[in-house]
């Protein structure tokens, strides 16, 4: 979902520039660095939103299947927690890439 949201706002070319700006070596930031930082910031926010939406949809599924009536609610709830954990991980990656673009620190 986050990738599709980014591609709905920015082109695939801009997405490629953002990756290039994050991993480009050199002391001077590129002219597209500001746009790339905005893209990574947007991607981070969309990751958090996607995690929340995934968790709510998972809870809805658990409640529709009456997961708590037979005492087996913990396994579906554990599976439901995968979406927020993955979203937090992807948002952290986006934050790191944004910092690399903004600060110009390269490997």
Image: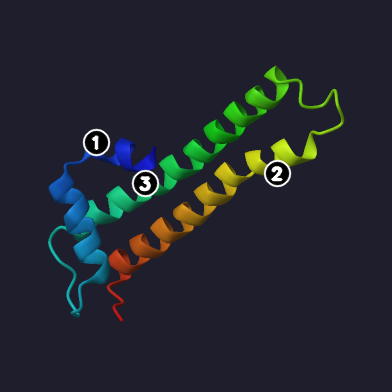
Which of disc 3 and disc 2 is earlier in sequence?
A: 3
Query: In terms of depth relative to the viewer, which is nearer, 94 or 71?
Result: 71
Instruction: Please provide percent x and percent y for residue 45.
Output: 43, 43
Residue at screen point 39% across, 56% down:
94
Q: Residue 64's quadrant in the figure?
A: top right
Residue at screen point 56% across, 43% down:
83
Q: Is residue 6 left or right of residue 33?
A: right
Query: In terms of depth relative to the viewer, which is nearer, 83 or 73?
Result: 73
> Which quarter of the image is occupied by the C terminus?
bottom left
Residue density around tag 3, few if under 14, some if 14–19, many if 20 or more, within 10 Å: many
- Dot 1: what SS? helix
Residue at screen point 18% across, 55% down:
16
> Which quarter of the image is occupied by the N terminus?
top left
Residue at screen point 45% across, 44% down:
47
- Dot 2: what SS? helix
Whether label 2 touches label 3, CB < 8 Å: no
Q: CA distance from mark 1 to mark 2?
A: 33 Å
Q: Is residue 65 left or right of residue 33?
A: right
Q: Which numbered marker is on residue 43? A: 3
Q: Which residue is mark 1?
A: 9
Q: Is residue 55 left or right of residue 39?
A: right
Q: CA distance from mark 1 to mark 3?
A: 10 Å
Residue density around tag 2, few if under 14, some if 14–19, many if 20 or more, within 10 Å: few
- Dot 3: what SS? helix
Q: Is residue 64 above or below residue 43?
A: above
What is the basis of the colouring in this image? rainbow
Residue density around tag 1, few if under 14, some if 14–19, many if 20 or more, within 10 Å: few
Whether label 1 touches label 3, CB < 8 Å: no
Instruction: Please provide percent x and percent y for residue 80.
Output: 64, 38
Q: Which residue is mark 2?
A: 78
């Amino acid at each position: 979902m986050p990738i599709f949201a980014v591609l709905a706002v920015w082109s695939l070319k801009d997405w490629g520039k953002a990756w290039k700006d994050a991993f480009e070596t050199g002391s001077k930031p590129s002219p597209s660095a500001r746009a790339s930082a905005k893209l990574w910031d947007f991607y981070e926010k969309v990751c958090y939103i996607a995690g929340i939406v995934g968790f709510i949809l998972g809870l809805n599924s658990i409640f529709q299947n009456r997961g708590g009536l037979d005492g087996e609610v913990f396994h579906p709830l554990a599976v439901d927690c995968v979406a927020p954990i993955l979203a937090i991980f992807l948002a952290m990656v986006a934050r790191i890439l944004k910092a690399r673009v903004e600060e110009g620190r390269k490997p």
